[in-house]
Amino acid sequence: MSEVKITYPDAKEFSQIIDAVSALIEEASFTLASDGLKLRALDPSRTAMIDLLIPREAFEEFPESLNEEVRIGVNFDDFKKLLRRIKKGDKLGMEVSEGKLKVRLMGKASRTMTLPLIDIGAEELPTPKVVYTVLAKVSSDALNEALKDADVIADAVKFDAKDDGLYVSASSDKGDVEVKFEKEGEVMFEYDLKEPATAKYSLDYLVDTVSKAYRISDIVTIEFATQKPIALTFEIPMGGKLTYYIAPMIE
């Protein structure tokens, strides 16, 4: 395979995306394709799935044409150690050749570090086919705070979509918490309710993912239906997105 180079203009932003992806998985294989850099993977328990697309338009440098898709298998602990060396204003270059990933941090100086690529069996994962009855676009920071409130009380959180807004609540023998996102409230940007819905999800997954991903995007799109997986989508510049699908807890 000939060497392939890509450059992302904001290394810090790229690092935050990797941080959000690694909330659920320790290693994964990115796919470099003609439309951009992609990743789709299940967490080890197969309770959650990550779906990432960073479109080619988001990159400063991207191959004109790719004869075949390029797979980039990385261990996230090792990758993130390199990314912690990012300085403000750095660009991030990545080059794949001869079984290695060369990471270049380009700022006042150009610093190059190399990681061995790891071979990860590719599993073809289809997009979940779920008919959602609720779509809510809310402040990602507000959702992060609501989940942290719930996490103080319980290990599961309930999402209730009603005519007047979205309710996020938790209860246990430690007490109760309820956060309401008003339909016309200042942190609710869009609310489309086809029919009321209620579902419960593990806070382990939601807190881990949202506490990292809210830094990527000011708005999160929440989609769910009664007793169905929830989809949380964070927009990335230039039309990219990071979506988490998390299975419900069946009562």
Image (cartoon, rainbow, N blue to C red):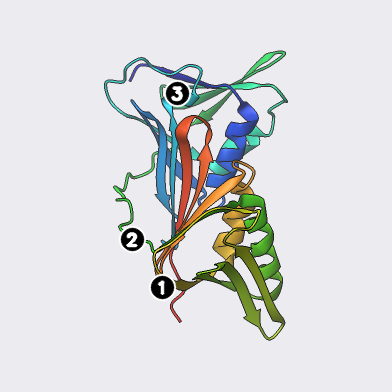
Q: How many marks?
A: 3
Whole-percent x and y of residue 58? 49, 25
Q: Earlier in the sequence, mark 1 or mark 3?
A: 3
Q: Which residue is mark 3?
A: 57
Q: Earlier in the sequence, mark 2 or mark 1?
A: 2
> Please, which residue is most extreme toward the bottom here?
173
Whole-percent x and y of residue 168? 59, 69
CA gap, disc 1 to disc 3? 37 Å
The answer to whether residue 70 is above or below residue 30 is above
Is residue 117 shown to the viewer in this render?
A: no
Work out whether residue 116 or residue 92 is closer to the camera in this orientation and state it. Answer: 92
Amino acid type, residue under disc 3 in the picture: Glu
Residue 179 image label? none
> Residue at coordinates 68% horizontally, 63% vertically from top-left?
148
Amino acid type, residue under disc 1 in the picture: Gln
Q: Which residue is mark 2?
A: 130
CA gap, disc 2 to disc 1? 11 Å
Work out whether residue 102 or residue 149 is closer to the camera in this orientation and state it. Answer: 149
| Pointer 2 with pointer 1, Cβ within 8 A | no
Helix or strand or loop: what does disc 3 sit on? helix
Q: Which residue is mark 1?
A: 227
Mark 2 closeness class: few <14, some 14–19, many ≥20 residues within 10 Å:
few
> Residue at coordinates 38% horizontally, 61% vertically from top-left?
132
Amino acid type, residue under disc 2 in the picture: Val
CA gap, disc 3 to disc 2? 29 Å
Is residue 144 shown to the viewer in this render?
A: yes
> Please, which residue is most extreme toward the left here?
67
Quadrant hosting residue 158: bottom right
Helix or strand or loop: what does disc 1 sit on? loop
> Residue at coordinates 33% horizontally, 61% vertically from top-left?
131
